[in-house]
Image: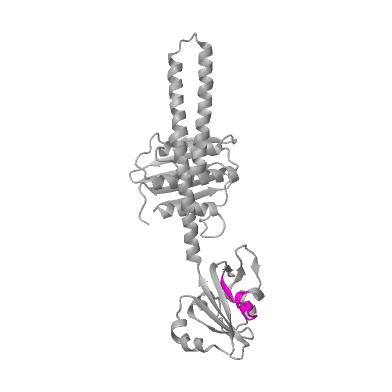
Amino acid sequence: MISPLWATLAPSALQHAPVGIVVCNSRATITRVNLAAKQLADVEPRGYSLQRAPIIFGEMYDMHAARVPATRWPWMRALRGEHIDSMECRLVRAGGKTSNVLFSSAPISEAAGGLSGAVATIVDITRHREDDVVERDRAVEDERSRIAADIHDTVAQDLTAVLLSLAAVEQNIPESFYAARQHLRLAAEMAQKGLAEARQSIWSLGQESLEHEDLGVALSFLAQQIVGNAPLKLVLHVPRQANGVSSGIRRELLRIAKEAITNVLKHAQATKLLVTLNLHLNRAELRVEDNGHGFTASPLPKSGGGFGLLSMRARAERLGGRFTMTSQLTRGTCLVASLPIVAAPA
């Protein structure tokens, strides 16, 4: 038995409602769906048993990533007399597409008091969830950058001033004051170590060159920090000054460099790493080359594996740039990111 309300409104308002609406009878057979519900389904839902819901709409997982069996879906619970209000879950289809939804359901009562079926609404909130994640990540990144900037503007600058003062004092002490020079050099070494640790904290937090850092200096420092004591010869071809590069481009170039250098250390088994930054009239080109074992060259994947490569390509293309990769077995790999000096409009 179909509710009189649905029969009256289905041809108009409910049929074109922005949320998915599904009606089933007391035998758990889907009898009516609107357009929004059909768009969430892989097959025409009408006539199917609710027991086959995972085939129609995909497997359901709760917010703890636990699979929800078909017998516990909201509309099956509604057929047992329960009312479910805005249960958030994730639908995962066979092809891998996922949707975050709010699932509500209620039993449909007969005049005599029995149950004639159930009605459920499915609200797709995937876009809202993605926006929430982006906003949360942006807030975290802003706070990390603020802390990194504070370290840069206080501890790092103070230690730099101390080092300059110590160097000036050492130059003005006569050679006979050997012990004094030793103490000064020890103090300078401690200040230098503190400065290196402050810069490492800046990179760990901000993961970018702060506004006072030149791109060339930042790239060199980043490469040296990542390589560290690894058994790898690092060769840097980086200009002393890299002026004119916008902050957005500088940030993405450094993030691409970080990902690329880290990949070399993890996977390439290389003994030599060459990092080059070339500045042209209207673009900046970053090259990261190694002499590792390489692999059979193939186009960059559009999905699936190779997440690091996909991430680097996405960063470059988002700002109007290009990202290419060439590799040969036993002869190494070369990654090239070419970005405009100023980010192109999105």
Task: Count all numbered tags in the image, as a single digit.
Answer: 0
Q: Considering only vertical position in the picture, is 306 above or below 184? A: below
Q: Residue 171, can we see it?
A: yes
- On-image quarter of the N terminus: bottom right
- On-image quarter of the C terminus: bottom left
Q: Residue 331, can we see it?
A: no
How far across and down, in percent of the image, does residue 204 sit? Answer: 52, 42
Magenta stretch bounds: 73-86
The colour scheme is: one colour
Task: In this rendered view, identify the residue nearer to me: 121 or 340.
Answer: 121
Residue 78 on the magenta span: yes
Q: Is residue 213 left or right of residue 196?
A: left
Task: In this rendered view, identify the residue nearer to me: 316 or 104.
Answer: 104
How far across and down, in percent of the image, does residue 286 sit? Answer: 44, 44
Identity of the residue drawn at 42% across and 19% down: 168
Q: Considering only vertical position in the picture, is 239 above or below 62? A: above
Q: Residue furthest top?
A: 176
The image quadrant of residue 16 is: bottom left
Residue 34 on the magenta span: no
How far across and down, in percent of the image, does residue 159 sit? Answer: 47, 29
